[in-house]
Image (cartoon, grey):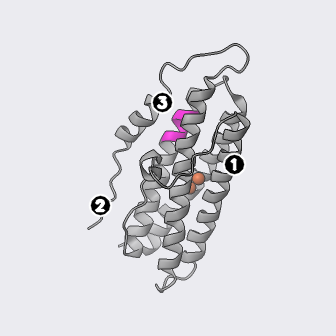
Amino acid sequence: MNTFKADIEEIRRRAKEKMDDGAVTSSYGADRERVIEVLNEVLATETVCTLRYRAHYFMAKGVHAPGIEDEFLEHANDEQAHADRVAKRITELGGKPDLDPAGLATRSHAQYGSAETLNDMIKEDLIAERIAIATYSEIVRWLANDDPTTRRMMEDLLATEEEHADDMAKLLARFGG
Ligand SMILES: [Fe+2]
Ligand SMILES: [Fe+2]
């Protein structure tokens, strides 16, 4: 039984809560504290996605599915690179990257999952990518021109998550039952 749920509307609502009525300051534009808070949720999301893809990489090794473990590993490495960019941006904004394992899953937009079959692994990854696409799109719209540097970074991440979702959709068509 796959318990991985994705109420994307609810997750988007929760992510958006942080962005509501953000104060605007003259020099920087965005509400720095709030941007740091939102970025720490992105950092948690990227970290949870790194861990999930790495677990899937090792689990897929035992399965006869040529090429699939390489795909999982590639995505794990992409998510780790995303996490690093986000952590760096948090420090540039004067914040502290929150990588405390306690509460990591709560701060993350996407879930870690509990898949045991290849089919469920791919589905979980696809759901997580779709959640990231939905929440990152909100963040890009919210940042607008108030913090163009952070917005451009989020646009880069968004583009990669779209590629990831496409990769997973193709794998699901190949290996999904
Ligand atoms: Fe990512
Ligand atoms: Fe991704």
Q: Amino acid at mark 3?
A: Lys
Label 1 crowding class (10 Å Cα cut-off): few <14, some 14-19, many 20+?
A: some
Residue 109 placement, left or right of 156: left
In this view, the residue in front, 170 or 9, is 9
Name the spot of residue 49 as percent of width and height, x first. 52, 58
Name the spot of residue 70 as percent of width and height, x first. 60, 75
Q: Secondary structure at mark 2?
A: loop
Label 2 crowding class (10 Å Cα cut-off): few <14, some 14-19, many 20+?
A: few
Q: Where, quadrant-wise, is the N terminus in this rendering?
A: bottom left
In this view, the residue in front, 70 or 43, is 43
Q: Residue furthest left?
A: 1
For label 3, the residue is 18
In the rendering, which numbered label is found on residue 85?
A: 1
* Residue 19 drawn above or below residue 126: above
Sequence-wise, the earlier of marks 2 and 1 is 2
| Mark 3 CB lies closer than 8 A to ligand 1 | no
Q: Secondary structure at mark 3?
A: loop
For label 2, the residue is 3
Q: Where, quadrant-wise, is the C terminus in this rendering?
A: bottom left
Quadrant in the rendering for residue 144: top right
Q: What residue span does the magenta drawing correspond to?
A: 135-139
Q: Amino acid at mark 2?
A: Thr
Q: Amino acid at mark 1?
A: Arg
